Image (tube, helix red, strand yellow):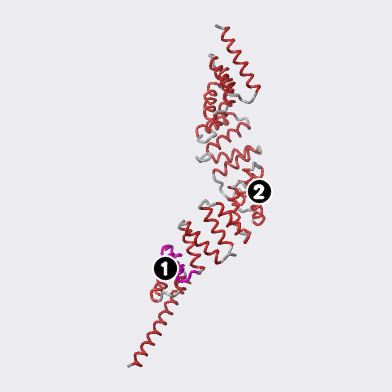
Amino acid sequence: MRCMLLFLFILLGYSSIAQMDNLYTEASKAYDSQEYEQALRFYSTILAQDSSQLKAYERAGLSAFRTGDLPTSRNLFLELEKRDSTSKLALTQLANLYEQEQNTPKAIKYYHRLIKLFPDNATLYRKLAKQYQGAGLKRDAKAHYSSAYKLNPKDQFTIKGLAELYLMERAYASVDSILWAGLDRDSSNIHFNLLIANSKYRQKAYDSTVYYMEVIRGKYDFRPHQNKMLGYAYLQVDSLDKSIRYLTKAINDAGTKEYAHYNLGIAYEKKNDMEFALHHFNEAVKAGISEDIDLYHRNVARLYSKEENLKKAIPHYKDAYKYGQDPLVLFYLARAADAYYKDKNIAIRYYDNFVKSEYDHEEYIQYSKDRKRYLKEHMHQSK
């Protein structure tokens, strides 16, 4: 009887091993053929029978991830982490999963753990830097991007991330330096050219802005703010037709509309097309929501004054002063009122306000004093 029981025990053991081997074989076939749902079922069955199978946790977690079942994948890798706290796969997948869930604190936690285990892995530093960058922690982001760059200066994602941070800091020399190194290896890289064009634009190097933007023209659809930037750069180098072309593309976007109209006004004025210039200055006034609204009114008033349409110029001078409080506008308003109104008290009031403003231009101040005196004398004599 004892021999029989021993024989049955051995037989059951062999049967269990054979069954487990068969499950592994079927699971591997499904996994290798990318039948991940089926593979997940096989590996889950294996783990239900033997929870010590670390390889099954790895394959089950990856299968769940590839089917899009992220909660199951996360739970499997958390369980694997409990059983093997140094598992690179578990820590990497958990960092990746938390990154995709936008759970930044936990993603940062796992990337830190990975860096402790693998301190020479440049990609881990870069991924950690990106998490800090997304969280607005610029100092930590910069430190880890810098570490990544030292370990792998060829990583384009690192170059882009570091350049973005330098640009935010207005460290333009550093922006240009790191991007030039990147462009040496990939001169047509869209992100690098956009970033260095932005850097040059902020440095008012408009010819360079045009150069770098032209490198990628036709390879990338410029966004409205990029069309505005390129249009303005062309305006500064007096390429007026190209400026008008790009600024026109920017007027359909609420975020760039007012600036595009204003600069189109300047471009058309330079082309001596006063009708279109005035149209776009007026459109800038209508769209104006920024602190530059006084400038828009001022230019509309200036063009109406050129056309000797003081009736329309005066309200815009008033609005220009209301929004900008620039004393010089009072001077222009006084002169317009002087020429337009029969009641010279209006002009006298504006001249007086300008004199009291103590504007730092002696010639204009003296003119206003003299003109105010003359108008008063003339009014007195005509009574």
Quadrant that contains the C terminus: top right
Quadrant that contains the N terminus: bottom left
Q: Nearer the viewer, residue 217 or 18?
A: 18
- Report the amino acid beneath label 2: Ala
Question: Is 39 one of the magenta-colored residues?
Answer: no
Residue 176 at what x, y percent from top left?
65, 50
Q: For numbered disc 2, what is the local secondary structure? A: helix
Q: Earlier in the sequence, mark 2 or mark 1?
A: 1
Quadrant in the rendering for residue 269:
top right
- Left or right: 309 with respect to 9? right
Quadrant in the rendering for residue 26:
bottom left
- Report the amino acid beneath label 1: Glu
Q: For numbered disc 1, what is the local secondary structure? A: helix
Residue picked out by circle 1: 37
Determine the residue positioned at 52% across, 56% down.
131
Determine the residue positioned at 56% across, 46% down.
222
Q: Residues within 10 Å of mark 1 (few under 14, many from 20)?
A: some
Residue 80 at what x, y percent from top left?
45, 69
Determine the residue positioned at 59% across, 53% down.
162
Q: Residues within 10 Å of mark 2 (few under 14, many from 20)?
A: few
Q: Main secondary structure of the magenta part?
A: helix
Question: Is 67 one of the magenta-colored residues?
Answer: yes
Residue picked out by circle 2: 173
Q: Nearer the viewer, residue 69 or 376?
A: 376
Q: Nearer the viewer, residue 170 or 234?
A: 170
Residue 75 at what x, y percent from top left?
42, 65
* Residues drawn in magenta: 58-85
Residue 157 to residue 352: above or below: below
Residue 214 at what x, y percent from top left?
63, 47
Q: Nearer the viewer, residue 117 or 378?
A: 117
